[in-house]
Image: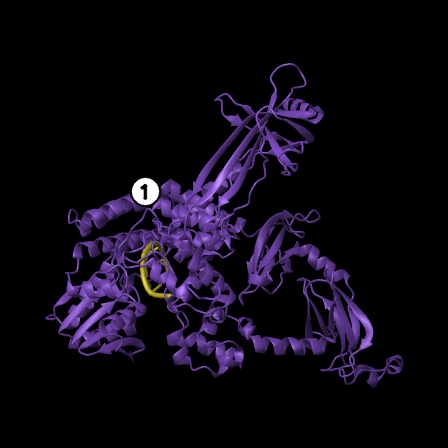
Chain colours: A purple, B yellow
Amino acid sequence: MELIITEKDNAARRIADILSGESAEAERKNGVNVYKWGGRRCIGLSGHVVGVDFPDEYNDWRDVEPVELIDAPIEKKATKENIVSTLRILARKADQVTIATDYDREGELIGKEAWELVRDVNDEVPIRRVRFSSITQNEVTNAFENPDELDFDLAAAGEARQEIDLIWGAALTRFLSLSSRQLGDDFISVGRVQSPTLKLIVDREREIEAFDPEDYWELFADLLKAPDANDGEDDSAEFEAQYFYRDEDDNEAERVWDEETAESVFEALETAASATVERVNRRTRTDDPPAPFNTTQFIRAASSLGYSAQQAMSIAEDLYTAGYMTYPRTDNTVYPDDLDPEELLDTFSGNYHFGDDADDLLELDDLEPTEGDEETTDHPPIHPTEDVPTKGDLSDDEWEIYELVVRRFFATVAESATWEHLKVVTAVEAAAAGDDHTLKSNGKRLLKEGYHAVYPYFNTSENYVPDVAEGEELEVTDARIEDKQTQPPRRYGQSRLIETMEKMGIGTKATRHETIEKLYDRGYVESDPPRPTQLAEAVVEAAEKFAELVVSEEMTAELEEDMTAIAEGEADLSEVADESREYLEQVFEDLRDSREEVGDLLQKSLKADKKLGPCPESDHELLVRQSRNGSYFVGCDGYPDCEYTLPLPNTGKPLILDEECDEHGLRHVKMLAGRQTFVHGCPLCKAEEADEQEDEVIGVCPECGEGVATEEQRDEGGEAAEAEGGELAIKHLQNGSRLVGCTRYPDCDYSLPLPRRGDIEVTDERCEEHDLPELIVHNGDEPWELGCPICNYREFQARESESGSDLESLDGIGSKTAEKLSDAGIESIEDLKSAEVETVASEVQGVSEDRLRGWQAKAD
DNA sequence: GCAAGGTC
């Protein structure tokens, strides 16, 4: 039996189809697909199925000095047990093994890991390696006809990276975490890729903080061409012209740096009746279609449609798994020879959405696709496959991304566009004698639409400037002066960050967006575009001082050089790793005496990230804290001497804003909760507002209101008055939320939710069923007729169980987990209760059987 | 529990 091993299940299935002529059958073993035909079996791994780690005795952070990790042994441990064991079973019976992992360095290493697993159980079987850069009939059959050997040197290059990353990352992460006593989930991490990325963000923030804005002025005039009776065309619309002058280097400059000059130019423009055309410059420019999508450019394009890097990749992943587009993780920007653009366009011909554009393209004489600078061997650039979905097959987001991918492919085979640029320079007489003031207008017109016809994502707006002749007099109809300030550099957006990382050579196509997510998870950045926290600034500062290499792109650059040397047989894995170890020893030598200093710096910054402002009852500061049950509140830094607290809303994660409350000097708080994100404001103001609001009784409590005493009974006193039951009232809580609750709280905790925002009007109409008033919420233009609060709550619950979004209400289930669960078919708490724990745990990554059982217990 | 790299 021949055993074929690929990097992933998807590749295994397609290769099996190609080699078997679609006759291969899938069989599930141990939860792993094995494709079977004739004397062949094909199994897909899941990337690395083993990983490097330290032996178990190094697990306790407190028992092991971080510096010991530098020379600790490194083991390979199975990380995907079921795949490893299935592979072993098959390998025992194999008389030929073929490694068909991806054609890149990491693929070679994954291949070597498979090689070792096979050798563990079968030291005889011949193992060969096949390489192909796209999974097509031609390439795959070709590769299997010309098998090769595994490249152990190339794999060793990958192993060097693994070891060096582990040693540096683990040792420094533990050092920083221990020195600042951050040992739980809030450890402080450092790494070859994440730290230089963080430094990019921190450096930019430093520039912004240090920025000193400067005033300048810009001047504009509106010009009007006199209607020309002769040419019959209506050129009489106004157009804008901007004042410019020649600076010291004789370049055109628009910004005027002193107010007096600006005012005098403005006066001249304002009083001028006409401007004379001095120069007319007309040129046509070719606008070439874009290169095929690699991951980075795909993320960038998706981000201009409003998708975060993470969202774009996750949707792309789904479209890839469904078979509608090629592998989304690629650096390649050159289509392989195997891709026949005409054939692919043909599949879109006749399509409701894309047919017309595809047909137009098919009519072109020449379908030569564009090419980017990067050509790799692992995967083709991202493009649609011949399996075309209908709009109904996809969600709205998926369709939008799919359309982007289809249209990008169209664009790469489309024609160039042509623009006409028209530059008109005019002159206005200066008020005082001397030089005239010059104005310029830049017009542009799209002469030939070209690829823009099929790829509408780029801006093609035109700027109108009429046809004028040199010497022509134009009417000046308006003049404007704008006072402006130079702006600080802008923060990196996620896609700009990913582009910059790519340029710096850090991270990979598959990990760059994950690295950014990691920075969010670690509490290093907040909001979008990402903004560094104080902690991030302290970590970068500490690293710059003691371990400069780990926050610099140099570390990757040097590592890449070493890896190339290893791959070419010019260097040795152990030699390279040991050199890196020595360097790290030196870092720890420098750090030894600064442990406390570094720890203090980190702790201070951690606290600064949580600071709201002065405590009203002591000399300490108020901080945002987390209670044992995970909820957030405001507490005093002087605790336990000062026990002052304020509540915070119970939805979302608090983000402290720069804005400060005038009255209490406390910073405002925003609650981050996905779509439900809102600004809470000053927690003390919110608490005071709530205290000032009287409870408004609207009816009888349905839980404990039976024995309500009548007014007469109360007046009479005695036993009947004691038997008083509860009433329902509209209550305002200190944490900003409102509810309809029982007046006997906390003895009776009956309550109904109310919206957080808007004025609540209690009407005279009453619900017949519950004898409660109908409520109306006034928020914005349209009043919201909430109705009886009990009926409203019932409807709300019914909607929730229908849409199934109640999962997140269970403690411990966040939005990401809920998403994963819903992918596995568990969409509501009801689903969860009846779910089979073993099956779900094996299907949903990161969700163990134990966690599931815990949630089930809570759900009951 | 640490990294970064595969994959999902």
Q: Residue at x 49, y 22 (%)?
A: A250
Using the image, name the chain to which the residue with label 1 belongs.
A
Residue A371: where, in percent of width, then height? 34, 49
Quadrant in the rendering for residue A809 = bottom right
Q: Nearer the viewer, residue A364 or A738?
A: A364
Is residue A68 in view?
A: no
Residue A635 is left or right of residue A521, and the answer is right
Q: Residue at x 19, y 72 (%)?
A: A3
| Vertical placement of residue A300 versus A795, above or below | above
- Report crowding for label 1: few under 14, some 14 to 19, many 20 or more residues within 10 A (C-alpha): some
Q: Which residue position holds label 1? A: A554
Q: Residue at x 45, y 78 (%)?
A: A853
Residue found farthest to the front = A230
Q: Nearer the viewer, residue A51 or A511?
A: A511
Residue A789: where, in percent of width, then height? 72, 75
| Vertical placement of residue A103 versus A82, above or below | above
Name the kind of residue labelled 1 in the image: Glu
| Vertical placement of residue A651 versus A22, above or below | above
Residue A711: where, in percent of width, then height? 87, 80
Residue A19: where, in percent of width, then height? 22, 71
Q: Nearer the viewer, residue A383 or A257?
A: A383
Quadrant in the rendering for residue A20 = bottom left
How many marks overall?
1
Q: Quadrant of the N terminus of chain A?
A: bottom left
Q: Tag 1's secondary structure?
A: helix
Residue A113 is left or right of residue A809, and the answer is left
Is residue A645 in view?
A: yes
Q: Nearer the viewer, residue A19 or A296?
A: A19
